[in-house]
Amino acid sequence: MATVILYSTTVCPFCIRAKGLLTKRGATYQEINLTEQPERREEMIEKAGGRRTVPQIFINGKHVGGCDDLYELDREGKLETLLAQ
C-alpha cells in the first residue's frame, strides 16, 4: 500500500473532500494538520514547490497536488494505480 501524506487545516472543505476520496479508495494516510502544527507550514510549502494552499497531497513521496488534482487523477483512473504501489 502507498504512503500518503496530506497537509491540511481543520476547517478546510477541500481537505475534507480529499480525505473522503482517499478513504473511499481504501487509502490510509498521515494527516499533518497545520492548524495544530503551524510550524510545519514552511515544510509543506518547500515540499510542494511553493504551493501555499491546503490540502497538499503526497503519494510515495511524490507531490500530486491539491484536492482538484487528486480528483483529476481519480477521473483519469490513475489514483488507484498510485495507491496500489
Image (cartoon, rainbow, N blue to C red):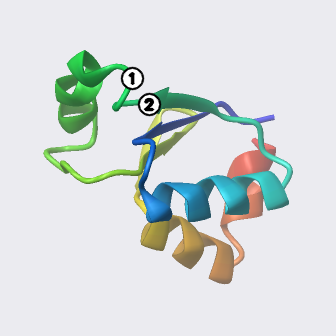
Left or right, 56 with reference to 47? right
Q: What element carries label 1?
A: loop
Name the residue beneath numbered marker 2: 33
Kindly tell me whether residue 76 is visible in this rendering.
no
Say if 75 sits above or below 33 in the image: below
Q: Residue furthest front?
A: 11
Label 1 amino acid? Glu
Q: Residue at 28% across / 32% down in the picture?
A: 44
Say if 60 sits above or below 74 in the image: above
Q: Which quadrant, please, contains the N terminus?
A: top right
Give the camera-side residue of 62 and 23: 23
Measure how far apart labels 1 and 2 are at the Cα level.
6 Å
Q: Which quadrant, please, contains the C terminus?
A: top right
Please report contact status of discs 1 and 2: CB closer than 8 Å, yes or no: yes
Left or right, 73 with reference to 43? right
Left or right, 12 with reference to 74? left
Say if 16 sits above or below 40 in the image: below
Name the residue beneath numbered marker 1: 36
